[in-house]
Image (spheres, coloured by chain):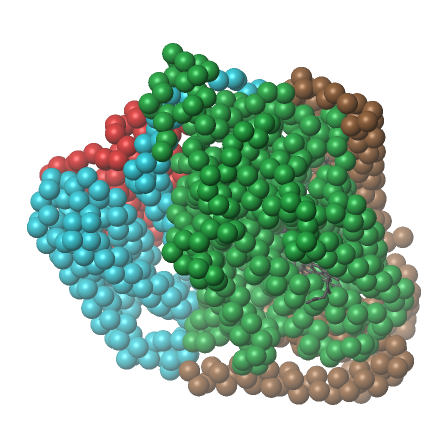
Chain colours: A cyan, B red, C brown, D green
Amino acid sequence: MIEHTEALEHTATAEHSHAAAHVHRDDEGSKMGMWLFLFTELLLFGGMFLLYGGYRFAYADGFKVAAADMNTFIGAINTILLLTSSLSVALSIAALQQNQKKLCLSLLWFTLLCGLAFLVNKYFEWSHEIHNGIYPGGPALENMSNGEILYFGLYYVMTGLHGLHVVVGMIFIGFVMVFIARDKITSINFQKLENAGLYWHLVDVIWIFLFPLFYLLH
Amino acid sequence: MEQTHESRAFGTENHSHTVGYGTYIMVWLGLVALTAITVTVAGMHLGSLTLLAALTIACIKTSLVAYYFMHVKFDNMVIKVFIAVCLLIFLTFWILTFSDLSFR
Amino acid sequence: MNPVVEVVDNSFIFIVAISVLLLVGITIAMIYFVFRYSEKNNPKPDQSITGNTTLEVVWTVIPLLLVMAMFFYGYIGFRDIRNIPPDAMVVKVTGRMWVWSFEYENKKKSDTLLYLPVGRNVKFELSSADVVHSFYVPAFRVKEDCVPNRTNYMWFHTSQEGTYDVFCAEYCGMNHSYMLGKVIVITEKEFLEWVRVPDTLKTDTLKTTTTSVVAPMTGEVKADTSKTAGDKKDTIKTNTKDTLLRRENK
Amino acid sequence: MTDTLAAHEGSYLEYEGRHKGILGWVLSTDHKRIGLLYLSAIMVFFFVAMTLGVMMRLEMLTPGETIMKPQTYNSIFTLHGVIMVFLFIIPAIPAVFGNFIMPIQIGAKDVAFPRLNLFSWYLYMTGATLAIISLFTGGGAADTGWTFYVPYSIRSAQNVSFTTLAAFVLGFSTIVTGLNFIVTIHRMRAPGMTWFRMPLFAWGLYATSWIQVLATPVIGITLFLIILERLLGVGVFDPALGGDPILYQHMFWIYSHPAVYIMILPAMGVVSEILPTFARKDIFGYKQIAISSLGIALIGYLVWGHHMFVSGMSDTARIVFSLLTFLVAIPTGVKIFNWVATLYKGSIKFSAPLYYVLAFIFIFSIGGLTGLVLGALATDIHVTDTYFVVAHFHYVMFGGMGIMFFATMHFWFPKMFGKMYNEKIAVIACTIIIVGFNILYFPMFIMGYMGMPRRYYDYLPHLQGWHILSTVGSWILVAGIVFMFGNLLYALLKGPKAARNPWGGTTLEWRVSSPPTVENFDEIPVVTGGPYVHDKPTYIMQPSKELVHENGDKLKGETLKAH
Ligand code: HEA
Ligand code: HEA
Ligand code: CUA
Ligand SMILES: [Cu+2]
């Protein structure tokens, strides 16, 4: 059942583990941890998507009526904003790898800017709806059909939660920028930047789904 | 310890691959184009196909982001398997929940 | 005997019998090994035993067959439980905190007491006015949840005259354990007489509720029960009012 | 099993690092200290919840009011369930013994993310504090049952928001632990420790961790939505606004069924440690037991619907879920049969931990087999939401995981504290526990089949005999448990010093001193064989000295030199 030692195998694994133990740094492990964390985020939203699926299946018409209220243009702009910010994060890693610290930092500033613009857009979208009385318990929503109420309930929860993730991602990137500025993150030690990037991309990926599901139901 | 061997096969432990700026920009262009397509398709009143098209395009976009921006392309087998497991489990949640919703 | 009761009890016996056999086998083997191969009786362990592929296959395949048989029995019974005979009479059941209300095909209503004619198949259309309840009649081995905004169904056959307990089996708040009722199976003739009279009987029914027939708990508690039945109404009110208020405030 | 290795550093219990006294504990990132932090917190809640359980039994002694009002009873079973599930049984074995033992077993000096590990304890304490706050604020303790079914949980005037928030935070605590363990097991195994040389406890934890990571977020979001509904009136589950209570139940059980395997898999891992140790031979069917853990975890994701057989779910789904449910019995059976076979031709040293394990196999089998009655459609429709279910889950949770928690404490007690307890008393206590346990819970199967619904404050008089029997059982159980903890507590204070390897165990934790030193190992050991090989050593504890000597030319000394 258990093969007894092949000395060769030993050397290989021994070498590896010791390297890891001595450097006190395990980038691969850190990345693995980050991915596992992303899975939990994915399933957190996954639960919401499942709910969305269930209700859209039951109230297809109500959802369509409700979605007519959404401004596809703003949604599309927001999509582009997040895609672009994802690009700039990816580029920033490449820049750091090539020791272009300045470029890296400016790309990250640009990312933050995109994130901020996204949030500003969301703010206007939300206040527009709220102004029209469409919010939980609001006068306009009260008179709508069940499908519409559910649509807006999900809309607020899901985009709200997503917005929260944008904020967290921005804070994460902010910290990483400080580290880069202080040379704690460098071209040979950039796993933290990579992890912040992974998180940011996840936020992007979730929006990639939110956009068609809430804006594009014709 | 298979991951050891794998990470070896993919190069050194603590350094991932460097990707040129060009690749990233191409991917971004693709993503923007797909966004344009999905908006257009949604406006075409294809009935039930609208949802299918929108989801397919979203999936393609996600794969692009994951594969290039998130460097899954260069990740070792372990992480790829992790992702597959996660998606598989997520899919079973859907299938089994809809074994209820779509039959009642 | 009632066919559903029979099939449920039989699948229960089938599963339990297999289970007991397995349990006894495992336990006896375990105890025997512990004594037979104790330090004293067997000072030198046999280190060569680390597994056996044949055995692994055996105790994968045989249990698989056994559990599939169990599933199948359960499924057969389930088919009977869910397939409503076409000749069934229909009673609407509504659960609300914490009373059962019944409505017959001729719109006659009754609370708590469910009168049914003997020898009939009865289909129940279950729904709820507030939270989830569950209509449970142990004597007939059936229950099904009453969910607001939905109609679930179940059925049973009234094979014998008599009085049977009704419970609410889904937790529904303070007086969940007092959300009781009775199925009273009477002769066809008595039933027709009862169901024909519209609402005059209503007060009558209520009186019965608080006196002899239901007598939910022991005599001593009865006073208590009626007291809780008193607050009961208040709590419902506050409870629903609360939610409404909350809605309005927002 | 020669104790050649001398402890160079002090034990982790005495170690004084940057902080002294209590701060040295609550700020420690040492996996062993965090394990003990968890242990102390968990024990407190375990006792609280047990006391609540005994109070429920007292109330059920007579029909009508015995010691409390209905509203109190409802809050008590909710609290009992919530504390037992979220504060005791889910974190207990992974967070206490997983943290303490697993890194040593795989030859690591700590977990992959020590600070995150400490953070998870703080999350746990935050959740626990929220749960306590919920008792004294708002409308008082939640009264929804631990399942928080909508719409009752939305409407109840009690303080449900805080309780769900507590469960939400506790969820994150387990996620963090799970994530940490997966990375630890992937990245930090000692050289030579291949997957199939890993102790089965680590395998159990590995499977558990995957459930923690992939299932817990779903309940997180679900409970979060309840809070939003209650506080902001967002309509997602409320049927008055079109919501679907059955969809809520899906979301709840998507997590909570896999969660029952979070409870049992680590316990099963410990069974696989204790049996070969006391049978003094290799475990039977190592690979099958290892893989079956993953099998249980995987199938565990597919069966949640069996909690909803009468909810109004579609008939198709009921049939599918019933079929899938039965599949879980197969990998579980594989484990049971292999365990029993391990005893065959062993040289069994009868002692307290082994006795608890035998009790486990018997009691858990009853619980698991009655799970099959619940899994079968026809029978479940009759017994669901009755005492039959209550009996089933106490047999698997308390009789399965709970008893194994006791076994685990007895097994690793000498290692963790360096003290030895009185084994005779431990065995007597175990006997009392087994007897009390069965008198307490077996009558519930009978009552359940007779139609006694669960979560009932009151019952019909004809059941009183069974209820009295059950309550008396709870008193016997109390006696046994008090006896058992008394014995351990006495040992902790006054017990004789324990040897490094009192049981003749073969895994790595028995090769380090009792209690272990701060960094566990002077040198990372090299593994040369399976975890339960008794007739020859399979670990090289000081590779820098021994290896070069033993296989001289084959191994390069310098690559193995540590420190
Ligand atoms: C530790 C926790 C734990 C474990 C391990 C299990 C294990 C199992 N459970 Fe249990 N269960 C709970 C905790 C647990 N359960 C809880 C808490 C609830 C109630 C929740 C609530 O509503 O509050 C519940 C409720 C519950 C229900 C819903 C009841 C209802 O509300 O109507 C069902 C239905 O299918 C079920 C089934 C099973 C099955 C099939 C297993 C299987 O995994 C069991 C497998 C084990 C064996 C089968 C025994 C050993 C094997 C052999 C001896 C080999 C040979 C066997 C055969 C050939 C058959 N459980
Ligand atoms: C690990 C899980 C676990 C454990 C160990 C227990 C242990 C016990 N449970 Fe638990 N129980 C649950 C999990 C658990 N329970 C869950 C999840 C529910 C469902 C809740 C719901 O419906 O929502 C439940 C429901 C439940 C009910 C059903 C309520 C109902 O439906 O009406 C009952 C009724 O008797 C009960 C009783 C007990 C008893 C008597 C114990 C005993 O075993 C306790 C034994 C206790 C002792 C032996 C005490 C020892 C010591 C002392 C008392 C000493 C004194 C204290 C101090 C010094 C502080 N439990
Ligand atoms: Cu109605 Cu419980
Ligand atoms: Cu389950």
Q: Residue at x 59, y 48 (%)?
A: D417
Residue A135, image x and y in percent? 36, 76
Q: Residue at x 77, y 56 (%)?
A: D483
Of residues C87 and A33, the one drawn nearer to the viewer in this rendering: A33
- Up the image or down, B4 lies above or below C52; here it is below
Of residues A55 and D55, the one drawn nearer to the viewer in this rendering: D55
The residue positioned farthest toward the top in the image shown: D553
Disc count in the image? 0
Residue D293, image x and y in percent? 58, 37
Of residues C208 and C97, the one drawn nearer to the viewer in this rendering: C97
- Up the image or down, B10 lies above or below B29; here it is above
Q: Residue at x 18, y 59 (%)?
A: A112
Observer able to see residue D466: no
Relative horizontal placement of residue A191, taking residue C230 as reference (left or right): left
Which of the 4 quarters of the picture holds residue C55?
top right
Residue D105, image x and y in percent? 52, 36
| The C terminus of chain C, quarter of image | bottom left
- Up the image or down, C126 lies above or below D351; here it is below
Relative horizontal placement of residue A127, taking residue D39 as reference (left or right): left
Observer able to see residue A21: yes
Relative horizontal placement of residue A52, taking residue A70 as reference (left or right): right
Residue D303, image x and y in percent? 59, 46
Q: Residue at x 20, y 68 (%)?
A: A120
Which of the 4 quarters of the picture holds residue C140?
bottom right
